[in-house]
Structure formats: C-alpha cells, structure tokens
Amino acid sequence: MSGGAATAGVTKPKPRARKRRGAPKSFDRPRYLRVFAAFVYFFLFAPILIVVLFSFNAQKSLTVLDGLSLRWYETFLNDPVLRESLFASLQIAAVTMVVGTVLGTMLAIGLVRSRARWSSGLNILMLIPLVTPEIVAGISALLIFWQIGLQLSIFTVMLAHITFSISYVAIVVRGRLATMGSEAEEAAMDLGATRWGAVRLVLLPGLWPAIVAAGLLVFALSFDDFVLSFFTTGDDVQPLPVRVWSAIRFGVSPTINAIGTLMMVITLTTIALAVMLPRLFGRRESAIKVLTGQEGG
Amino acid sequence: MAGGFWTRFLVPPGLWLLALFALPIGLTLALSFGYVDEFGRAAYDSPVAPGALDNYADAFDPIYLPSLVRSVTYALATTAICLAIGYPIAYYIARFGGRRKYLLIGLLVLPFFVNYLVRTYAWVALLADEGLVNNFLIDVGLTDQGIQMINTPWAVIGGLVYGYLIFMILPVFASLERMDPAVIEAGKDLYGNKLQTFLHVTLPQTKQGIMAGSVLVFLPSVGDFVSATLLGGPDTFMVGNLISDQFFAANNWPFGAALTVIMMVFLTVWMIGYLRAAARETKPAL
C-alpha cells in the first residue's frame, strides 16, 4: 500500500535500471522462487490477520471464531486503567515527536553546515543510539534518572524516547539536506534576508517534507516502543505497550487482540501519513526516498 | 564567522545526547563495578577496589553463562535464518518485481510496523499447546495430543526471525537494486550455468547488503528478551532476560549493569569487525 503510492513519485529515471524494463523471459523466472515468496508473505501476515480477526470474536475463545462483535473493544475502552495508558502513550508520542523533531532537525542542519571540529565526534554520537540494543539504552536511562533522583513517570519515558528519536530525525533530515545546496539561502541573504531569515524562509521550507515524515515516523516508533518504556516508566500511569506486556504474561485474552488491533491502526495511520503528507508539499517526490534518505546518498 | 552560526545548531541536541545517552552509558559502566549494600541499594565502587570485578566474574558463573552463550547462538541462528529467508525474497522482488517492486517491498515492511509485542503475542496464540496450530493438527488427525511448539528454542528463534527479518531484507534489496542486471547477463555468457552465475556474480556484488543485514539482525537479537519471555521458558532465557531480572526481580543493579557492559563490549567488537570489513569493500552501507 504505502510503497505503491511512493513509486508513482516522479524521480528521474536512472539510465541503467531502465534499460531492461520489460518483464524477464519466463525461463528466467524460477517458479519455486515465486512460491517461496508467497509463503513468506503468508507467514508475515497470517499472525497479524489472526489478531485482527479474533479481536472481533463474539466468544472468549482464541481458537474458534464464533460470531462478530465489538465486545473486546468495549472491554478495552471501558477499562479506566487501559484508557489512561492509551492516552499516556499518545501523549508520550506527541511530545517525543515535537521535541525530537526540533532537536533532530537542528542536529542535521548543524552536522551538514557547521565546520566545528567536534562535529564529526557528534556525528558518531548521533549514530551510536541507532545500533545500540534498546535494552542497553533503557537501562542506561533508568540509571541516570535514578542517579539524579528523578521520579519515574511518563515524563522520564518521554526523555528516553526523545533521546533515540533525535538520531532518527537527524538521519532523515540530513538525507534531504545533503541534496540541497546553500545557494538559495545565499541568494536570499544577497537580497537582504538575515541569516535567521534565510533559515526560516528558505532552508526550513525546503526541508519540510523530510521534517514532517521524520516526525511522524518518530511518533509511530515512540507509540509502539516497549523496551525503553518498560525500563523508564513509573508504576502509576504506564504506557500501553507496558500494560500489554503485563497482560500477555498473565495469559492470552481477547482484549489483547483488541488493544493490538487498535495500536496497529494508530501506527499504520501515522506511517501512511508519513508516506503521503510529504507528497502534498508541492513537489511530488518519493516519500520512501525521503524517509530512507536515499535522495542524497 | 559562517561556521560559528551553524555550530549553534549543534549545541542543544549535542548536549541532550551527551547528558541522556553518553553519560548514562558511562554510569552503567561505573555501576558495574559496584555492589549492593546492606540496605539492598546499589552502590558505586572504585574499579580498582578489591572485589570490584566480582560482578564480571559472576556473569561467567555456570548458573549464568548458559544464558550468555544462548544469546549468541540464538542470535546467530536468527541471522542465518533471516538470510536464508530474506535473500531469496529480496532477490525475487529486485529481479522480478517489475513495476510492482516498491509495492511488494512496502507490503513486506507493513507487518513490521505492527507492535513487536503484539506480533509475538500472535505467535503465542498460534503455537500454544492448545493454540490454533495444534487444534488444527488434531482436527486433521495428524496427531492426537498436539505437538509442543511453545517453550522450545525454535519458538524463540522463530519469534526473533519474525521480529527482525525486515532488517535483512531491506539492505539486501538495496544492494541488489544497485546491481546492474547487465552483469548477470554477462555472467551467464561467461559461466553459462545459473548457479555459477549467482555464486560468482550476484553473491559477491551483494556482499555489502548481506553484511549490513546480518549486523542489523544480530544486534537487536542478542539483546532481545521479549521473544524468550513470551515464546520460551526458563530453559531458553537469554542475556536480556537475565539483565531485566536483575533490575525488576533480583534487584541486583550492579550485576545487571555488568551484564549490560559485557553485552555492549561484545557487540562493539562485532560492530568494529563489520565496519572494517565494510571499509574493505567499496562503500560502507551503514
């Protein structure tokens, strides 16, 4: 779904890839590979479809589908603790999105434009969180909060989420920034704009598609995050994935299917927006390329 | 002073990452030399104090060592299986996807935006002793009592594969995309045989993608504790379970910190090995 919309984006065709565009001859297309691919898609989607399907089950059974109903969604949304957790997760994701996007964008701009000697060190510091297992990040965050005596709450979860989101945003925004020269800003300044004016009127509008895509991506990642939240949340209000964790360990229940399905809808909507929104900003461009930073290379 | 202006942008995010990422990692290292005092609280100790390395010695105690070894073997198995599944599918899409290439990749990415807990939970519902798969097998008459699938190492590894497969597919797909299909034709002219063409032409050209994918799958797999908790049992616990237990059950933070440091050092060595190997190839993919 998402990929299809993106391919339509008008990117300049690469000369080499287009040379052999017709379908390869049939002898060149091994049938077993197609069967294998079908199997992989089946295994990826089957468990998810089962979660969705059973979330509408009228019975408590997790093996027999017997009639459709919304009772598990009612159970979920009528439970004050779960509802509170849902709102906590949305709140964490929203704050993470805003703060992480601002800081990450600043980092991307600074890394590309600044000639400070320590910026290469900062570049490495920015990359490390991306390859650090979440459990390491979670425990380190827990230790710093403990050390400075900060009570664990959804606020500490936000702090931990913002930390990792800075790197994601910086990567995405930097990918786009690398494709933009500084000529337009210089022209703006020749015409009388101040430096900040050039940033505000020229640089940021150019970066906007990447910033929006990165922000939404970070929202989805934060909303779905379990490990970081698990280590940094307090006892009173817990993010939804942490509640789901306790519930699953307690045993499988149809309510979990409903929570899972609703979370899926929220995440996938965010991702769909991340893919589609940048295309609304004037130029039609491939959102996948914006998100993966492929544009600049 | 053009440089100075842009440097200002680096200060807030730089300070944030220092205070909330670099410093905390340092704290973890510092606490790993510590001990639990008589009130059950974690306390720091000098790394040269007698007994400062006790936590590290404990980690290699026969009680805990199996979890460490298991993490590595499970992560290696996960990486191998992800490669075995991910490579063919990436190859199929890159070579034969045609105009629907990005649609097909998009479809593969989609499940990975479903919460990891929920996805693992789905497998619990499927593989449980009285789960869907066993019910089906009994109904068809293939078995009377069902097969034990959950609480086995394969269930845990399966959960990890399901969790991280996409990290293999995407870099391999990207490296196949970068490849000029004409060289495959040339390879066929030279070697004739399809298998030989694949081994001598395609595979070496996609080595970078394979290496990047392997690292991206291996790193999170080693530290994972969700799959082992939900799909496994005490016999399949990995280092991640051990670490989280120290913080939430055993309440031995310094030992948990030491285990975390051991994992970090191990993964850093792995990472450096990868970066050096990648540097030897043309362009690093990460």
Image (tube, rainbow, N blue to C red):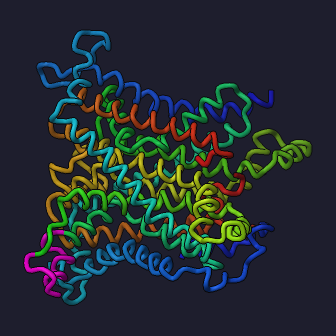
Is B68 one of the magenta-colored residues? no
Quadrant in the rendering for residue B203: bottom right
Residue B136 falls inside the magenta stretch: yes
Q: Percent x, y for residue B163? A: 37, 60
Stretch in magenta: B128-145
Quadrant of residue A76 within the rendered picture: bottom left
- Residue A285 location (% of width, % of height): 70, 67
How far across and down, in percent of the image, does residue B13 sit? 56, 36
Kindly identify the residue that appears in the image at 79 percent across and 39 percent down. A195
Q: Nearer the viewer, residue A283 or B31?
A: B31
Image position of B25 (left or right of A105): left
Q: Image check: A105 left or right of B218?
A: right
Residue in view at x 29 percent, y 77 percent: A50
- Compared with A22, B202 (above or below) is above
For the question of whether residue B245 can be seen, the reply is yes
Percent x, y of residue A250: 14, 59
